[in-house]
């Protein structure tokens, strides 16, 4: 059996709360074995844009990344947030290494083609464009890669890229080399059978149960794309997808998405 | 004889000029063998501070790094500038990897003690706190480390750190493992015998010549600390210090500082 690799993804909510972020990173330090962290953005980039007199350019809840926005998100995600996380992990005794996709050419993306909407400098990913040898070199050197949501196109252009997509593409690309556990950490304890009952966490979701839950219509709409992506990852060799509370990663309550 | 390692340091002037920066990085891509780049800041951080309604806090030409300034320089140096340089080097075919001192714990600094002046979140360096094994791992993996001027203290605090000091401390720390050439790249062709004559580049400066030049008082005052640092680096095993034009690194005109 190949070695276990745990890939954790955290979102903006926890990044915006310094105490929660510090707590999460301390818990992450206690997780044994090989691990990777992928972090999203948080509100800071929008606040910085606002301070510069610019409103974030959004269409259907998705950010349009024009040139100034790209500069600001690069500064915020790859600069401030990534380096703060790395410094806090070092404090917690983890030899973390911050990465954008340009570093070591680790994630080469392609600029999203302009369709009905021009999303601007946004990167789309394919798993064959993940430089897995480099990630193995780092993991073999007992380093913990910490990815921000910035990639590049190999032609000198940085690209803003969805952090969930980075996490799941890394998981799929590395599934051949490690037994990959993909952990989506957020503010709830897992997938809830009843969105109004925080204690209704479903401990395990298989394809059969997922079909039944969807038919019943009880799962929160925002959770459906996450679960669809989770099953897609399992189809490509990821061992488990875990949906859990970022503040309870070392506690047993969580949802494990698995094949059977 | 151990392998040659070339450490290049570039300053703010070239970083502020996108065409010159791109040209320099293209020339750097043509330099063979193992190499490291250290880059300074440029005006962008001050411009961003000004956009946020803050004036840079300076005493005797040195920046005071308060908490907001630290955030801004971290965003600018470790985020925007570092990632742009890495993306452009990747485009030029160099497998560059951007680093702050926190990444891989590669440079652990100590916050400068408060004396007559409190410089704020500024890091001082000692060569034994350079993690040379990690740098060897990267160089052995055919990666080119690209350092920004941000370090950390190992206790979760990022620190603003002079880029010349980072370059010379790296050179001294790595001198036992490589035959290190330390290249200080700036806007002139080398050390001038006559500050008013751009063609008066001194091709080689030994300690004897340096003493004579200082006695004559012809070397520009701003060059003296650079040369003092260069000889200090030679005393600690660095093979050569080269002072050259950032736009002419592959041309013969330059000043080589050496022991004899």
Image (cartoon, coloured by chain):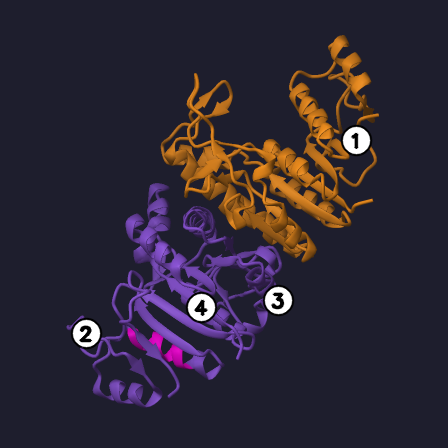
Chain colours: A orange, B purple
How many badges with numbers are in the image?
4
Q: Chain of mark 4?
A: B
Residue A28 in picture, x, y percent from top left: 72, 46
Q: Which mark is residue B6?
A: 4
User: Label 1's element?
Assistant: loop
> Which residue carries the number 1 mark?
A254
Distance, label 4 to label 3, CA atoms, is 17 Å
Q: Is residue A98 magenta?
A: no
Q: Are marks 1 and 3 on the same chain?
A: no
Magenta span covers which residues? B223-231
Tell me if mark 4 has few (under 14), some (14-19) or many (20+) residues whose alpha carbon lies within 10 angstroms of its own: many
Quadrant position of residue B103? bottom right
User: CA gap, disc 2 to disc 4?
Assistant: 27 Å
Q: Chain of mark 1?
A: A
Chain at tag 3: B
First-in-chain label (4 vs 3): 4
Q: Are marks 2 and 4 on the same chain?
A: yes
- Disc 2 to disc 3, C-alpha distance: 41 Å
Can residue B135 be seen here? The reply is yes
Q: Identify the element where label 4 is drawn.
A: strand
Query: Who's the residue at 42% across and 36% down the image?
Result: A70
Mark 1 to mark 4: distance in Å?
50 Å
In this rendering, the label closer to the viewer, 1 or 4: 4
């Amino acid at each position: 059996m190949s070695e276990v690799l745990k890939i954790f993804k955290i979102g903006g909510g926890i990044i915006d709360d310094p105490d929660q972020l510090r707590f999460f990173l301390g818990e992450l330090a206690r997780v044994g074995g090989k691990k990777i962290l992928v972090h999203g953005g948080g509100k800071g980039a929008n606040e910085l844009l606002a301070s510069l007199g610019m409103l974030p350019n959004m269409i259907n809840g998705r950010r349009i990344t024009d040139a100034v926005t790209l500069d600001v998100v690069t500064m915020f995600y790859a600069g401030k947030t990534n380096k703060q996380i790395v410094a806090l992990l070092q404090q917690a005794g983890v030899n973390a290494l911050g990465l954008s996709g340009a570093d070591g050419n680790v994630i080469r993306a392609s600029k999203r083609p302009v369709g009905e909407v021009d999303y601007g400098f946004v990167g789309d990913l394919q798993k064959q464009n993940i430089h897995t040898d480099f990630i193995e070199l780092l993991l073999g050197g007992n380093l913990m890669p910490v990815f921000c949501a910035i990639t590049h196109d190999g032609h000198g252009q940085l690209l803003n890229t969805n952090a969930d997509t980075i996490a799941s593409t890394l998981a799929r690309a590395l599934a051949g080399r490690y037994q990959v556990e993909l952990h989506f950490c957020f503010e709830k304890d897992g997938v809830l059978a009843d969105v109004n009952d925080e204690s209704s966490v479903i401990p395990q979701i298989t394809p059969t149960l997922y079909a039944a839950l969807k038919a019943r219509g009880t799962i929160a709409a925002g959770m459906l794309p996450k679960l669809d992506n989770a099953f897609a990852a399992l189809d490509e060799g990821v061992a488990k997808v875990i949906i859990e509370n970022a503040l309870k990663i070392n506690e047993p309550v969580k949802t494990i998405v698995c094949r059977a």
